[in-house]
Image: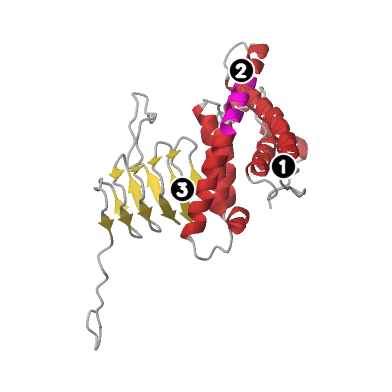
Amino acid sequence: MTPTLPLQKVVEALTGDYSNRYPNIPVHERRIPSIACVQEMVELIRSIVFPGYFSNSMVNPGSLLFHTGVNVENLLHILSQQIFDALFYMEQGDKDTAAIREQSQVLAKQWMEQLPRVKQILSTDVKAIFNSDPAAQSVGEVIFCYPAIKAIANYRVAHELYKLKVPLIPRIITELAHSETGIDIHPGAQIGEYFSIDHGTGVVIGQTSIIGQHVTLYQGVTLGAKSFTFDDEGHPIDVPRHPIIEDGVTIYSNSSILGRITIGRGTIIGGNIWLTKSVPPYSRILQTKAVELALTDGAGI
């Protein structure tokens, strides 16, 4: 039986000669965003976008202005601080704290200006999901219960931060939804209005995907890359490598659409399809029908 190490030796093993022992896990000696604070920020955004659904207070038309004002003020404070921490962490060399603070405040305000637009687009997503699912009893049920709305809302928020080139935080926001819902949407993807994901578990949407309006995906759909381009040092190059999905496309469960291909508008792609070539508008891509064989008296063995 292996003797138990004293705790002091465990601590020494974890910390002694650190850079040589653990070269891929550096100690971060700089400010860094807080996942807990980012989660709080996301909850505040939900309360603003869906007033009355995600808070302990009842909201009515008479109190809407007050509740929104309080939440927006709190959100701006948290967002400015988290952007500051992210910028500070990524800055190399000597840091001008005042300049980074000013930049973070400018970026936070620029993002806040986009929040009404984010809310408007999310209202189209809610409508698309409600209209496409006969099991939904109300719009409120969609907002409260459907994982797709949580994942899409996080994506919409993160995408605006991504466009402002805010580091780290967009990925934290989308990965929070990924861990909760199983829906993985990269914040760099471009997704149009009236976007619907049904069920959702296992959906993957890559960074350079472009999705038009009125698109519906079912569980297990992957919009991925077929291959990668590498630089001289063997690192993958960030180039467009994910599909373009045009307006009105429906992709059923467990289908993989790979590479920089275009799926023409109005196309329907059936379940369990592996597709690596573009298809024209209004295509129907379906599996070959199964062949039934009656094996009797040992036939087929």
**Magenta-colored stretch includes residue 41:** no
Neighbour tally class for label 1: few under 14, some 14-19, many 20 plus, Cα within 10 Å: some
Picture coordinates of residue 204, whole percent (x, y): 45, 47
The answer to whether residue 171 shows anywhere in this view is no
Q: Amino acid at mark 1?
A: Leu
Picture coordinates of residue 13, whole percent (x, y): 68, 34
Picture coordinates of residue 113, whole percent (x, y): 59, 28
Q: Secondary structure at mark 2?
A: helix
Q: Counting residues from the N terminus, which is met first, the one under dot 1 or under dot 2?
A: 1
Horizontal side of residue 174 vs 240, given as left or right: right
Q: Amino acid at mark 3?
A: Phe
Q: Nearer the viewer, mark 1 or mark 2?
A: 1
Q: Nearer the viewer, mark 2 or mark 3?
A: 3
174 or 266, which lies in front? 266
Q: Counting residues from the N terminus, which is met first, the one under dot 2 or under dot 3?
A: 2
Which residue was labeled with disc 3? 195
Specify the segment rendered in magenta. Answer: 105-115
Residue 64 has which mark?
1
Horizontal side of residue 249 vs 129, given as left or right: left
Q: Secondary structure at mark 3?
A: loop
On screen, residue 13 above or below 195: above
Most distant residue in the front direction: 62
On screen, residue 248 above or below 229: below
Neighbour tally class for label 3: few under 14, some 14-19, many 20 plus, Cα within 10 Å: many
Which residue was labeled with disc 2? 103
Disc 1 and disc 3 in contact, CB within 8 angstroms:
no
State the separation of the CA atoms marked 1 and 2. Answer: 31 Å
The answer to whether residue 91 shows anywhere in this view is yes
Residue 109 quadrant? top right
Q: Residue at x 25, y 83 (%)?
A: 294
17 or 158, which lies in front? 158
Neighbour tally class for label 2: few under 14, some 14-19, many 20 plus, Cα within 10 Å: some
